[in-house]
Image (cartoon, rainbow, N blue to C red):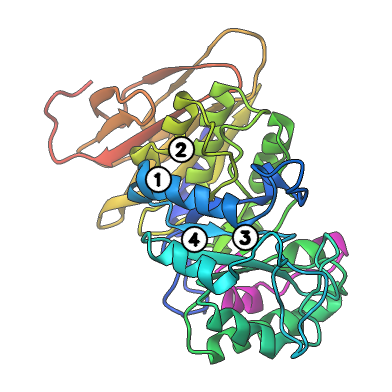
Amino acid sequence: MDGCGRSSLALLVLIVLGVSALENGLARTPPMGWLAWQRFRCNTDCQNDPNNCISEKLFMQMADIIASEGYLQAGYSMVSLDDCWLARSRDAQGRLQPDPLRFPSGIRALADYMHNRGLTFGIYEDYGNYTCAGYPGILGHLQIDAQTFADWQVDYVKLDGCFSHPADMDRGYPLFGHYLNQTGRPMTYSCSWPVYQIYAGIEPNWTSIINSCNLWRNFDDIQDSWDSVTRIIDYYGDNQDSIVPNAGPGHWNDPDMLIIGNFGLSYEQSKSQMAMWAIFAAPLLMSVDLRTIKPDYKAILLNTAVIAVNQDPLGIQGRRIYKDKGIEIWARPITPVDQNYYSYAIAFLNRRTDGTPSEVSVKPAELGMTYPNGYTVTDLFSGVKYGLVNPKNIFKADVNPSGVVLLRWDLAASHDNEI
């Protein structure tokens, strides 16, 4: 690899994450959980499709699986509503209300159901006259809606931005966050504020966004396809100089949901999404039918070694440090740290589709990894332990088409078993 890798990695570790940020004590690592939207969309036909419609039954079933099948233990602690949970009108007191046929027990009962299983509960609304699917939005009702969410014991609020003016969001999103904080109930605040402004040609006020939101969307909605995943990866790489500095404990870039286990990704591509979301320090928000997910894909979601990278307490988002002929190298500084030396998660991403694995050959020193004692290297998907690698030695890996090799390079204490 040439000098571009060295200079990029040096820039990565010099990024200052000291921007004044929201301090509600929440989301110190990227949130993890389950969202309905990508997999179940706005299916409200419970008469003809009772097992897949947006209803309390669906969310209770997902909560039971998350609590009992290892997801909660792995860190997926939140279950959240998305669009289409609402009734078409507010109640006589002007409060939001759920669809009475699909959520007959009410939202507070659903929150209690989650809490009784050790989970947190999330809800969806929109800073607009309507939600994206045409249900009541929060405009004109910010304070009462914030208090309603607190009364319902909500833990996580996702606020979309359809049917509103992007120029108004600089005032509206922080104001709603203020009302959430005024309730006295800690609620993680997920904003769609930047992406709507970017599409409108408005430069987002990142200082205000970081001061107001725990996480935020800044690119397209993910679709169930490899093309969609790669467009997100490209956006995060091509715009990393402006994106990466905004991330850190309590405030995260959100590239959207994990679609692993659905219909659009192969096994290799699913590992690639999981690896890249770990490098991005992204929220890990599954949107998949956990009742029918195949074991191989479930194992990707439950890979605790990859999750540990995603949840690394330093909270430094990774960067693309090499790109050539379909091969990309991404690096994320992680713990443990020794003075000015970091450990790293390194992703070798193969964007090629020519049907055979591609060999990636690097010297760690060429990537800026110069710890004198070397690094102990582990493949986080295969579990293979490569022992200790000297910074000046060549390291090789075969990467499958549209696949990834995700390696953990931990600072070593000695030169034992050097390769």
In the rendering, which numbered label is found on residue 71?
A: 1
**What secondary structure is marked by label 3?**
loop
Q: Amino acid at mark 2?
A: Leu
Give the x, y percent position of residue 26.
44, 72
Q: Earlier in the sequence, mark 3 or mark 1?
A: 1
Q: CA distance from mark 2 to mark 1?
A: 8 Å
Q: Is disc 2 in contact with disc 1, using a CB cutoff of under 8 Å? A: yes
Say what secondary structure mark 1 lies in. Answer: helix
The residue indicated by pointer 3 is 81
Q: Seen in the image, is 179 located left or right of residue 17?
A: right
Range covered by the magenta-colored residues: 198-215
Q: Residues within 10 Å of mark 4 (few under 14, many from 20)?
A: some
- Quadrant of res 94: bottom right
Between the residue at mark 4 and the residue at mark 3, the CA separation in whole angstroms equals 35 Å
Work out whether residue 273 or residue 332 is closer to the camera in this orientation and state it.
273
Q: Residue at x 49, y 29 (%)?
A: 297
Q: In front of the other: label 4 or label 1?
A: 1
Residue identified by numbered label 4? 15
Q: Assign the C terminus to one quadrant of the image.
A: top left
| Dot in front, 2 or 4 | 2
Q: Is residue 403 above or below residue 63?
A: above
Q: Is residue 14 left or right of residue 210?
A: left
Q: What's the residue at 57%, 59% (across, down)? A: 80
